[in-house]
Image (cartoon, rainbow, N blue to C red):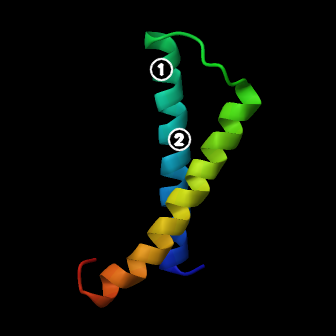
Amino acid sequence: MTPRRKSALLWGAVGLLAFLVLVQGYQLLVGPTPVGFLGKLALAVVVGIVAGGVSYLLEGRLARKGRT
């Protein structure tokens, strides 16, 4: 596995977990959400995929510019 792919997977995991933490904080402070457990999990997976994909795409661009 290339370092770029590993980095993207880790950023995806960070995005997934951060979303779940935010949902839990919302439930603690505001109240129950209208979405069930599986809906929250599905949204977290989508957020993780988007975060990983964006980090994979942008890392190459930043590396070409010498910013990594």
> Residue visible at 76% across and 32% down?
38
State which mark lies toward you, 2 or 1: 1
Q: Position of residue 21 (x, y in %)?
A: 49, 31
Counting every numbered tag in the picture gives 2
x, y (%) of residue 6?
53, 70
- The residue drawn where x is 50% and y is 58% is 51
Q: Alpha-carbon neighbours of circle 2 within 10 Å: few (<14), some, or many (≥20)?
A: some
Q: Earlier in the sequence, mark 2 or mark 1?
A: 2
Q: Position of residue 14 (x, y in %)?
A: 48, 49
Q: Determine whether, in the image, residue 36 is placed left or right of residue 32.
A: right
At a point 25% along the width and 87% down the height, the residue shown is 65
Identify the mark at residue 17; answer none if there is no mark: 2
Under circle 2, the secondary element is helix
Answer with the quarter of the image where residue 2 lies.
bottom right
- Label 2 is placed on what type of residue? Leu
Q: Position of residue 50 (x, y in %)?
A: 56, 59
Q: Which mark is residue 26?
A: 1
In this rendering, does residue 26 appear at all? yes
What amino acid is found at the position of numbered circle 1 in the picture?
Tyr
Q: Marks 2 and 1, how far apart in space?
A: 14 Å
Vertical relation: 49 (above or below) 27: below
Residue 55 circle label:
none
